[in-house]
Amino acid sequence: MSLPPPFMVPLAALLVPLVSSTVSAMSDAPGPLTLAVHQNGDAIEVQLIGESPEARQVSYLLEVSGKSQSRHRGKTTLAANARTVLSTVKANAGPDWCVRLVAEEDGRAPYEIREGNCPEDS
């Protein structure tokens, strides 16, 4: 059995995480902030959820766009092992909506999560 040339293996390994992930390549691992998005017709409800195994300070920018646009920026300290809803946004967003979260925490690169129909350059 022959192995592929060494330069081909790293390229394939880099492409796999980009295929199915909604978390941007700003970071390798999921962070303590996540989104729960529920759609009912043209209305959406977005929950920003924080959960961490240790106390941790985080800052974030949550953007919801569709028929209108909403931005929520915050900074908080998450308690250890406590799932917390940090923000809930309800909107009449229409069929083409986008939810974008940009999060930062000490000691790691910022990360981004997108849900819905988000343009690549937003």
Image (tube, helix red, strand yellow):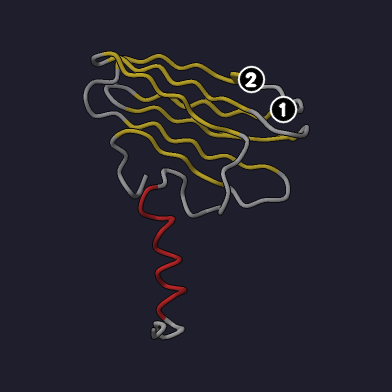
Give the labeled residue for mark 2.
84
Q: Secondary structure at mark 1?
A: strand
Q: Which mark is residue 114?
A: none
First reached walking from the N terminus: tag 1 or tag 2 = 1
Q: Is the C-beta separation of discs 1 and 2 under 8 Å?
A: yes
Q: Nearer the viewer, residue 70 or 2?
A: 2
Q: Name the amino acid type tagged 1.
A: Leu
Question: Where the N terminus falls, by quadrant?
Answer: bottom left
Q: Tell me which amino acid carries mark 2.
A: Thr
| Quarter the C terminus occupies | top left
66, 88: nearer the viewer: 88
- Residue at the location (28% across, 36% down)? 117
Residue appearing at x 73%, y 26% in the figure? 81
Please give the label number shown on residue 78: 1
31 sits to left or right of 21:
right
Q: Residues within 10 Å of mark 2 (few under 14, many from 20)?
A: some
Locate residue 66, reporting x and y percent. Answer: 29, 26
Q: Quadrant of residue 39?
A: top left
Query: In the displayed structure, does residue 46 sit left or right of residue 95?
Result: right
Q: Residue at x 49, y 20 (%)?
A: 47
Percent x, y for residue 100? Answer: 43, 35
Examine the image and state in which quarter residue 87 appears.
top right
Residue at horizontal 40%, vertical 27%?
A: 64
Residue 26 x, y percent position in the rendering: 52, 53
Residue 91, position in %: x, y? Answer: 36, 15
Q: Which residue, as the protein is rendered here, is positioned at the far left?
A: 95
